[in-house]
Amino acid sequence: MIWAAKNMINFPTHIGMRVFILILFAQLVSLIGSSLTDFALGIWVYQRTGSITQFSLIIISGALPLIVASPLAGVLVDRWNRRWVMILSDSGAALATGAIALLIVTNRIEIWHIYLATAISSTFYAMQGLAYTATTTLLVPKQHLSRASGMMQLTGSATQLISPVLGGILLGIIHIEGIILLDFATFFVSLITLFLVRFPEINTVKTDDTKQVGRNSLLQEINYGWTYITDRQGLLGLLIFMATNSFFFAIFNVLFTPFVLSITSTNVVGIIVSIGGIGSVASSLLISTWGGSQQLIYSLFGFQLLGGLCILFMGLYTSLPLLTLSIFLISFASPIIYGSNQVIWQRKVPPDLQGRAFAVRSMIGSLFRLLAYLVSGPLVEKIFQPLMMDNSLIAVSIGKIIGTGTHAGMSLIFIVVGCCTMLTTIAAYQYPPLRLVEDKLPDIIPTSKTSF
């Protein structure tokens, strides 16, 4: 990973870029450690309980704090020194991880301990993620934000590709106790890096839009993040569009593994997921080296449309080559979609308000994803599967294309999700404030002459 980054860019003379790259690699190490723990704990809980519900509660216990804690975390990120916010966040998450390791070693671990530790870690990650993203705007020249976003997406993509394989190997060698202790050790890489670097002061980039805010009550500051967005139709439209499609993609993500398992073996599922990871890494590398389109909103629309089309085809046709190609394309599109969205927000929101504005975005996105997690199972089991039974009216017509029975119920929901994603994208394109958000809404940060 380090070798790839050194070869795809020349390290810039801009000190902020050097700091960004150092933090990027430190976060990559920490992120791999955390992903290994998530993977190992998920397997441990499922093997110990045999309950999908207990397994899904880990996901929910990680998602809920992002919704509840994000508004307050956004205010604290804007109020406090962001380097110290990241140090505090990493320290808190490390303590929660260390507590789980201690409980497992002493054989006192209970399932509820894992839910609580996951919730605590998620709360700290809410602060850390907001501080990290907002700080990037201060460190990276505006014209290179897309490439920096690609590098950040690359760390996530590489982690998704590496962690399941590495986690499976390490579980057999050092067991869950060793993996959690390894994760605990990776936090120190991030902490040491953060102690060694310095961030620009937020006050040096304060704009006229935010001088009037001052230090109000927590509730007023939380509300100002929402007010800033709603006063700008383009940003509000972008928020609604991304949250809506996050809901559709979350349903797809929940059902993808059961869907593929209904037609093939677990080994083939692993291969397909790995190929998807390769697509995500390839896309992130492309953005990191190329920098992305000059009109990010069109990249976002185009690849969102492609993702919806792939989901639709996965529902219509169940051949393994088509499934593999579709998941590769969806994974390839994701970094471009989320990276383009991220850079638009970084350019349009003042640095000293990004904590609050990004917190609103994170809260709403997490709420929509959580809703998708909760409704996916009932949608399939209570609505779509019964619709595709042999004697139903819909099964008689659509069943000629996708078949009938349990698998056909998931195929039908993929068709609906794919169509909804494409229709939402087309509708969003027809909304001028969103389509022209990059032209009509001025950039907050001036273009730097620093080379990348």
Image: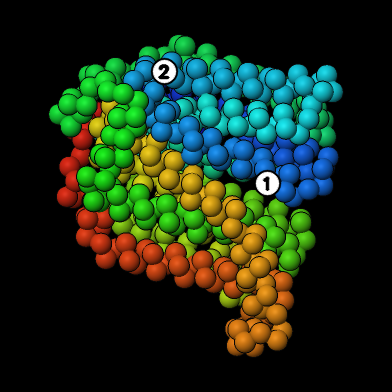
Q: Looking at the image, can residue 310 be seen?
A: no
Q: Identify the image quadrant of residue 258.
A: bottom right
Which secondary structure, mark 2?
helix
Q: Is residue 253 above or below residue 1?
A: below
Q: Observer-nearest residue: 132 or 7? A: 132
Residue 332 in the image: x percent, y percent?
A: 49, 54
- Please, which residue is most extreme toward the left here? 208
- Name the quadrant of the N terminus: top right
Q: Identify the image quadrant of residue 39.
A: top right
**Of the residues tagged 1 and 2, which is closer to the observer?**
1
User: What amino acid type is highlighted by mark number 1?
Assistant: Ser
User: What amino acid type is highlighted by mark number 2?
Assistant: Arg
Q: CA distance from mark 1 to mark 2?
A: 33 Å
Find disc 2 in the rendering and name its residue.
83
Residue 219 in the image: x percent, y percent?
A: 34, 29
Which secondary structure, mark 1?
helix
Left or right of 331 on screen, residue 245:
left
